[in-house]
Image: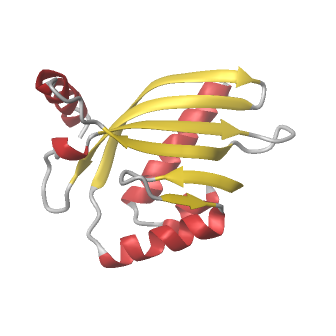
């Protein structure tokens, strides 16, 4: 499997763990000191902190389900790669993406000694695109087609 395929699978595992509301599985995908930057800018560093940050979210809130599309994976060396993706969220009880929470996602992945790929950094940035409602509409339609 190519580096790009491994990193794409890592990103898919992360969002699938979110969709399954599994904080432990999400945290396990990160490097020991990995950093997660959430949609609201909140940060969690390290697998324990990431898990403890996500656990009450899944316990106390009906989280929306992700749909996503990887735009690019670039290898920066034998053991490091960056992935860019777009993502939308479908609230519970619906089948329609909520455009206000569309996001651009960046994931930096690494591996040590040929071991498994792990997440060093995951950032989920809101798509605001001020003054560009047509671009937001087009992205929402693209993501809705994946739902």
Quadrant showing the C terminus? top left
What's the image's color scheme?
A: secondary structure
Eyeballing the image, is 82 above or below 43?
Answer: above
Residue at x-position 12% and y-position 22% = 134
Q: Nearer the viewer, residue 58 or 94?
A: 58
Residue 111 lies, in percent from the top left, at 76, 40
Q: Is residue 53 left or right of residue 63?
A: right
Res 109 → quadrant: top right
The quadrant in which residue 115 appears is: top right
The x, y position of residue 119, in whole percent, is: 63, 46
Residue at the spot 50% in from the left edge and 50% down from the top edge? 14
Q: Viewed as shown, does residue 133 lie left or right of 143? A: left
Q: Nearer the viewer, residue 71 or 108?
A: 108
User: What is the number of callouts on the image?
Assistant: 0
- Quarter of the image with the N terminus is top right
**Residue 32, x across and y down, in percent:** 72, 58
Q: Residue furthest right?
A: 113
Q: Residue at 26% of width from left, 40% of height from top?
A: 102
Kindly tell me whether residue 64 is visible in this rendering.
yes
Res 30 seen here = no
Task: Kindly identify the residue that appears in the image at 37 percent across and 57 percent down.
Answer: 19
Q: Position of residue 58 (x, y in %)?
A: 38, 71
């Amino acid at each position: 499997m190519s580096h790009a395929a491994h990193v794409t699978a890592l990103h898919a595992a992360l969002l699938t763990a979110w969709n399954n509301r599994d904080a432990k599985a999400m945290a396990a995908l990160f490097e020991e000191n990995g950093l997660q930057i959430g949609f609201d800018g909140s940060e969690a560093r390290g697998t324990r902190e990431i898990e403890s940050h996500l656990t009450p979210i899944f316990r106390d809130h009906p989280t929306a389900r992700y749909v996503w599309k990887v735009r690019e994976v670039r290898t920066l060396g034998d053991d490091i790669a960056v992935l860019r993706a777009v993502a939308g969220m479908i609230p519970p009880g619906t089948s329609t993406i909520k455009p206000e929470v569309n996001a651009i996602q960046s994931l930096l992945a690494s591996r040590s000694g040929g071991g498994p790929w792990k997440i060093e950094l995951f950032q989920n940035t809101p798509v605001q695109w001020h003054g560009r409602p047509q671009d937001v509409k087009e992205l929402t339609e693209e993501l809705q087609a994946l739902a």
